[in-house]
Image (cartoon, rainbow, N blue to C red):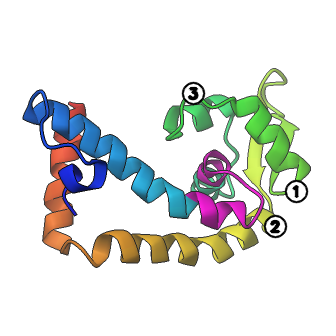
Amino acid sequence: MKLEEEIKQSKFNSEHHKLVLNLMYTFNWLEKPIKFAVSKHKITIPQYNILRILKGSSPNPLSPRDIKKVMIHKKSDLTRLLDRLVSKDLAHRSICPSNRRKMDITITEKGLELLEKLNPEIAKVSDERIAKNISESEAIKANELIDKLRG
């Protein structure tokens, strides 16, 4: 459905302004079912993002600094997010043996199991919200344009 119909607005300051609103609206449209999927497992989207990052580096540990560099939600309070993942036994935190001022973070077996449950649910959102509406070649073009937008 067109943005104009979704937000009941027919005029915009410019096409660029409309694009900003369209991206914001679409982000919320995509985030809602993902938030619902992760919340069923008592975690948040930023926590899910951290678990995916940790799985990608597994079995090698990452420092909080390394995690922060690649997080999608960069403004999140990483310390608190890690505290919650550790308290739920989804991640493990230890002092780095080679640098006692550095923390090593790894994903636990329980964290890996949670991702195995969640990944199909997130893929379903992708299929229902994206793949059913645009082709793979359109997705490639959209990704190229969004990457170009960020410079």
Task: Give the residues drawn in magenta, as a range.
Answer: 35-50
Residue beneath disc 1:
89
Residue beneath disc 2:
110
- SS at mark 3 in the image: loop
Give the camera-side residue of 40 and 114.
Answer: 40
For the image, the number of numbered tags is 3
Closest to the camera, between mark 1 and mark 3, is 3
**Relative to 104, is 25 on the left or the right?**
left
Q: In the picture, which quadrant includes the N terminus?
A: bottom left
Whether pointer 1 and pointer 2 mark residues with C-beta atoms closer than 8 Å, the reply is yes
**Relative to 21, is 121 on the left or the right?**
right
- SS at mark 2 in the image: helix
Residue 111 spot, x, y in % from top left: 76, 63
- Dominant SS in magenta: helix
Assess disc 3: are there few (<14), some (14-19) or many (≥20) residues with their C-alpha within 10 Å of its C-alpha: few
Residue farthest to the top, as pictured: 101
Q: Quadrant of residue 89?
A: bottom right
Using the image, tell me which numbered label, if any, was put on residue 63: none
Using the image, tell me which numbered label, if any, was put on residue 75: 3
Label 1 amino acid?
Asp
Label 3 amino acid?
Lys
